[in-house]
Amino acid sequence: KQEVTQIPAALSVPEGENLVLNCSFTDSAIYNLQWFRQDPGKGLTSLLLIQSSQREQTSGRLNASLDKSSGRSTLYIAASQPGDSATYLCAVSTSYNTDKLIFGTGTRLQVFP
Amino acid sequence: EAGVAQSPRYKIIEKRQSVAFWCNPISGHATLYWYQQILGQGPKLLIQFQNNGVVDDSQLPKDRFSAERLKGVDSTLKIQPAKLEDSAVYLCASSRAGGPGDEQFFGPGTRLTVL
């Protein structure tokens, strides 16, 4: 059974810092991995999607890497801003059920001015 | 394009009462998902529809939860009777075809509190 874990559970940093969020999964037979952002009272917004054959994806100040063999992904946020404050969730879809997303518990990020 | 719409946004009920949530997916999206997100946890898939047929309901507590998607568009999720542990945010998502790597778009969710 696939399990997804995220550490840390919460993070508070001053504006401008570079930071790394971690995601680990127990079964390396994944189809893809996604990072989502969740703002209070709002739905999830997809940030980056990495196919199992890829090593990383970049979008603006965000960079996500994937090491399938070790069951790990990291989300790197450069030059953090107060507007980055949100909960970040990673989710994997497995090779045997590509539609089904299995989510981690999330990292709650606060960036203060 | 308009996003996924859900209503109500908030609901408070007593245990053993019934409640229903409504979801309108993005126009033209064939696949619709209902997730349950308990406070402090990630979303968990309850049921997945492809048009008006059920693809996966393996994690739906069928003794109290039911869902339907009439005409392959809007969907309702019902809980009858509710328990305290059903307190959660219920998220609806849709995707174009539900194929490999197809992006899911999420609605704002309905926050349910069971007292």
Image (cartoon, rainbow, N blue to C red):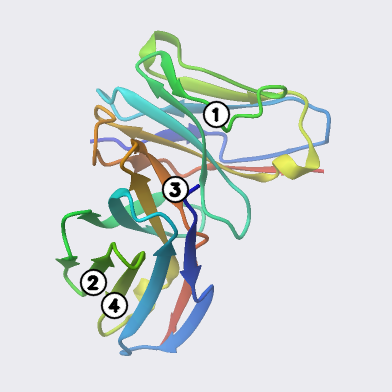
From the image, tell me which residue sits under label 1: B58
Tags 2 and 4 touching, CB below 8 Å? yes
Q: Sequence order check: which comes first, mark 2 or mark 4?
A: 2
Q: Mark number for residue A62?
A: 2
Tags 4 and 3 touching, CB below 8 Å? no
Q: Chain of mark 1?
A: B
Q: Sequence order check: which comes first, mark 4 or mark 3?
A: 4
Tags 2 and 1 touching, CB below 8 Å? no
Tags 1 and 4 touching, CB below 8 Å? no
Question: Badge 4: few (under 14), some or many (20 or more) residues near its Cα, within 10 Å?
Answer: some
Same subunit, labels 3 and 2: the answer reads yes
SS for dot 4:
strand
Mark 3 or 2, closer to the camera: 3
SS for dot 2:
strand
In front of the other: A81 or A100: A100
Q: Quadrant of the C terminus of chain A?
A: bottom left
The amino acid marked with disc number 3 is Ile
In the visual, does B57 lie left or right of A45?
A: right
Q: CA separation, marks 2 and 1?
A: 35 Å
Tags 3 and 2 touching, CB below 8 Å? no
Q: What percent of the width, then of the height, locates residue A51?
A: 20, 52
In front of the other: B92 or A76: A76
Q: Mark number for residue A102?
A: 3
Q: Chain of mark 2?
A: A
Considering every residue shown, the one lying at the far top of the view is B71
From the image, tell me which residue sits under label 4: A77
Residue at image location 75% in from the left, 44% down from the top: B85
Question: Badge 1: few (under 14), some or many (20 or more) residues near its Cα, within 10 Å?
Answer: few
Q: Is residue A67 above or below residue B38?
A: below
Residue at image location 33% in from the left, 41% down from the top: B105
